[in-house]
Image (cartoon, grey):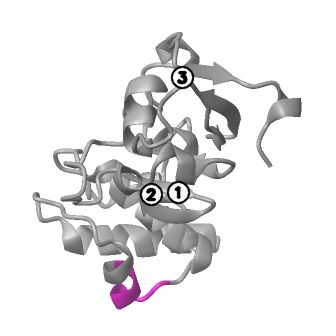
Amino acid sequence: MPRMTINERPVEFDLDPDMPLLYALREAANLTGTKSCGGGDCVGACMVLVDGTALRSCRITLAEAEGRLITTIEGLSRDRSHPLQQAMVAEQAIQCGYCTPGIVMAGAALLQRNSAPSKEEVEAALSNLCRCGVYPRLVRAVQRAGRVIQRRESISAAPAPGIEAADAAQRVPALRALPEAEAPE
């Protein structure tokens, strides 16, 4: 039974270790912000952070995720206060929303490494496919978030989500919370 930490919470999945992380997150953990991308013909909608690196969760098995730190869009900021989430709203870089979680995760990973990325660095980091074609706004949003991180700019906050994470959570038999003492290192 693969153990890992998801959104700062140690968990153990009672699932096949060869199952893609994507399906465990969506179906067993009820973390549906990570979008299903087609299982290999990936457009980046399934992007999560694995030990701080943006990776496509459809291409990682539970066995490969064993012992690692996984961050999903839900864990990036529960109240949508992450600078990139705020900048995406401020720059109107969200259209249909399908690709948005993956783009935010890829952009957040970039900003962890480099809070002042060039246009070319943003474009290289955001390899996600956005059918709505908001690419210029995405670049502006990532760069603006970098300025917020550097404390050179501020953004008026976007509204908080309408539901608390605790209220949205469901008991899922395939997922068990582990006591802190049993958490993977």
Pointers 3 and 1 in contact (C-beta within 8 Å): no
42 to the left or right of 180: left
The residue at which mark 1 appears reads as 49
Q: Amino acid at mark 1?
A: Leu
Picture coordinates of residue 124 (x, y %)? 34, 82
Q: Please tell me which residue lies in front, 116 or 59.
A: 59
Q: Amino acid at mark 2?
A: Met
106 to the left or right of 183: left
Q: Would you place residue 95 above or below residue 4 in this image? A: below
Which quarter of the picture shows residue 134?
bottom left
Q: Amino acid at mark 3?
A: Ala
**Most common SS among magenta residues:** helix
Which quarter of the picture shows residue 132?
bottom left
Q: Would you place residue 117 above or below residue 140 in this image? A: below
User: If the image is split into quadrants, where does the N terminus sit?
Assistant: top right
Q: Which mark is residue 105?
A: 2
- In three-dimensional space, the C-alpha distance between marks 3 and 2, rounded to whole angstroms, equals 19 Å
Residue at 42% x, 64% y is 106
Picture coordinates of residue 3 (x, y %)? 66, 38
- In three-dimensional space, the C-alpha distance between marks 1 and 2, rounded to whole angstroms, equals 7 Å
Label 1: which secondary element: strand
Q: Nearer the viewer, mark 1 or mark 2?
A: 1
92 to the left or right of 63: left
The residue at which mark 3 appears reads as 165
